[in-house]
Image (cartoon, helix red, strand yellow):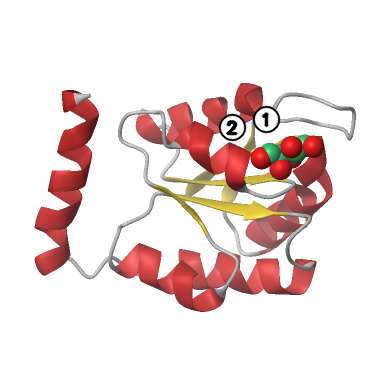
Amino acid sequence: MKIAVACDHGGFRLKNVLIQELQNQGYEVVDFGTYNEDSCDYPDYAVKAARAVASGDCEKGVVVCGTGIGVSITCNKVHGIRCALCHDVFSAKATRAHNDANMLAMGQRVIGEGLAVEILNAWLNTEFEGGRHVQRIEKMMKIEGEE
Ligand code: RB5
């Protein structure tokens, strides 16, 4: 499975930890930057990962900034993206099972690396439950075309 990743300077270190974890597990990682800790603008990088997921080039995406908020808001501007900001394992599982989230956002300044890796794995290993959640997602995604 191909995973898109991106970050800003505030998420650079955690992104590298997550890339290592993904590669150790055999995922193919496409890294859209940023590639160092020089100050930069998170939308420039997050949107690239989001577009790669929306186009189907990558199956899922993982984005990191200082809080996770800026990258998650950015990704959710791209049609077809459901990017969930998660800082606990329960939410990471729930957003896959109920929202079929295709992107995960986390904040390097919010949680430690160990928890972030646990959240990543919980998110990757949880399947969408379908059923009653399908119509809810359809309603949510329909809003994109109406605004
Ligand atoms: C950068 O200082 C910081 O604003 C950014 O990483 C992120 O937290 C924005 O939401």
The amino acid on which the numbered mark 1 sits, given as a three-letter code, is Tyr
Question: Is mark 2 in CB contact (under 8 Å) with mark 1?
Answer: yes
Residue at left offset 60%, top offset 59%: 26
Does any atom of ligand 1 lie closer than 8 Å to the CB of label 2?
A: no
Between 96 and 24, the one lying in front of the other is 96
Query: In the image, residue 117 lies at what x, y percent?
Result: 67, 68
- Numbered disc 1: secondary structure: helix
Q: 49 left or right of 141? A: right
Relative to 43, say whether 61 is above or below: below
Q: Quadrant of ligand 1?
A: top right
Q: Is residue 69 above or below residue 99?
A: above
- Residue labelled with disc 1: 42
Which label was assigned to residue 62? none
Please rate how many residues cluster around mark 1, counting C-alpha atoms within 10 Å: few if below 14, some from 14 to 19, many from 20: many
What residue is disc 2 on? 46
The residue under the point 46% across, 71% down is 91
Relative image position of residue 27 (x, y in whole percent)? 57, 54
Up-down relation of residue 141 to residue 133 (above or below): above
Whole-angstrom CA distance, mark 2 to mark 1, is: 6 Å
**Is ligand 1 closer than 8 angstroms to the Cβ of mark 1?**
yes
Task: Tell whether 18 sits left or right of 126.
Answer: right
Point 32% across, 29% down: residue = 79
Q: Nearer the viewer, residue 85 or 63?
A: 85
Tally the numbered discs: 2
Image-quadrant location for residue 31: top right
| Horizontal and vertical percent position of residue 66 | 75, 47
